[in-house]
């Protein structure tokens, strides 16, 4: 029996889990993910690094599930919201804290762009990007390792997530 590795997108498509937008209902889209990682130029051990990521139209996915940057770098992350109706942000968190950050964001509410101010689990985050907008954040790369990122708009964190690897 051969073992086959599939992406989250492939799994969801093969499982038949495709829910669309209802006129007045929740949006749970199960298409997307994958994409090639964006990474800093080879040999860069610090300095300025720019990473670009975008939402996938009306789907609840980023166009990249993996980003990379070198340790010691100053990272500028640009989030392009390609939706015509939805709002998104990009929140980089300490490993294992995604659910806690999403819940704290939900409690912080819309007035705080679904990000709890001073949350020690958040490393960096953009402002909430309205439809068609781009938001950016600049921050120092954390120590080498894998760091999860997600959108904290209510319900988006379930599918709209990825990993930033610092090498």
Image (tube, rainbow, N blue to C red):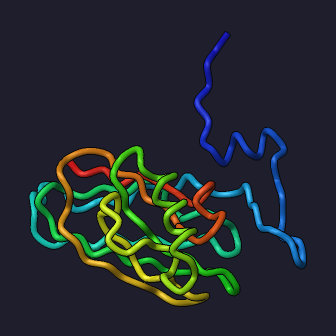
Which residue in the rendered view is the most extreme toward the top? Answer: 1
Say above or below: 89 vs 32: below
- Quadrant in the rendering for residue 141: bottom left
Question: Which image quarter holds the N terminus?
Answer: top right
- Quadrant in the rendering for residue 40: bottom left
- Whole-percent x, y for residue 57 in the image: 66, 75
Could you tell me which residue is drawn at 42 percent across and 66 percent down?
A: 91
- Whole-percent x, y for residue 56 in the image: 62, 70
Q: Is residue 89 left or right of residue 136?
A: right
User: Depth check: 25 or 30 in front?
Assistant: 25
Q: Is residue 68 left or right of residue 53?
A: left
Q: How many marks?
A: 0
User: Depth check: 119 or 33 in front?
Assistant: 119
Could you tell me which residue is drawn at 25 percent across and 44 percent down?
A: 145
Which residue in the rendered view is the most extreme toward the right? Answer: 23
Say above or below: 3 vs 91: above
Could you tell me which residue is drawn at 20 percent across and 57 percent down?
A: 142
Q: Is residue 133 left or right of residue 87?
A: left
- Whole-percent x, y for residue 10 in the image: 68, 43
- Whole-percent x, y for residue 159 in the image: 62, 56
């Amino acid at each position: 029996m051969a073992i086959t590795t599939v992406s989250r997108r492939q799994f969801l498509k093969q499982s038949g889990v495709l829910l669309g937008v209802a006129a007045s209902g929740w949006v749970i889209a199960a298409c997307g993910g994958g994409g090639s990682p964006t990474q800093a130029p080879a040999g860069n051990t610090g300095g300025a690094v720019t990473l670009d990521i975008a939402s996938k139209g009306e789907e609840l996915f980023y166009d990249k599930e993996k980003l990379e940057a070198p340790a010691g770098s100053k990272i500028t992350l640009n989030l392009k919201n390609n939706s015509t109706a939805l709002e998104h942000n990009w929140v980089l968190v300490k490993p294992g804290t995604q659910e806690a950050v999403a819940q704290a964001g939900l409690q912080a509410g819309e007035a705080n762009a679904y990000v709890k101010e001073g949350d020690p689990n958040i490393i960096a985050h953009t402002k909430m990007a309205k439809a068609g907008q781009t938001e950016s954040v600049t921050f120092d790369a954390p120590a080498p390792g894998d760091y999860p990122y997600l959108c904290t708009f209510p319900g988006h964190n379930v599918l709209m997530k990825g990993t930033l690897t610092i090498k």
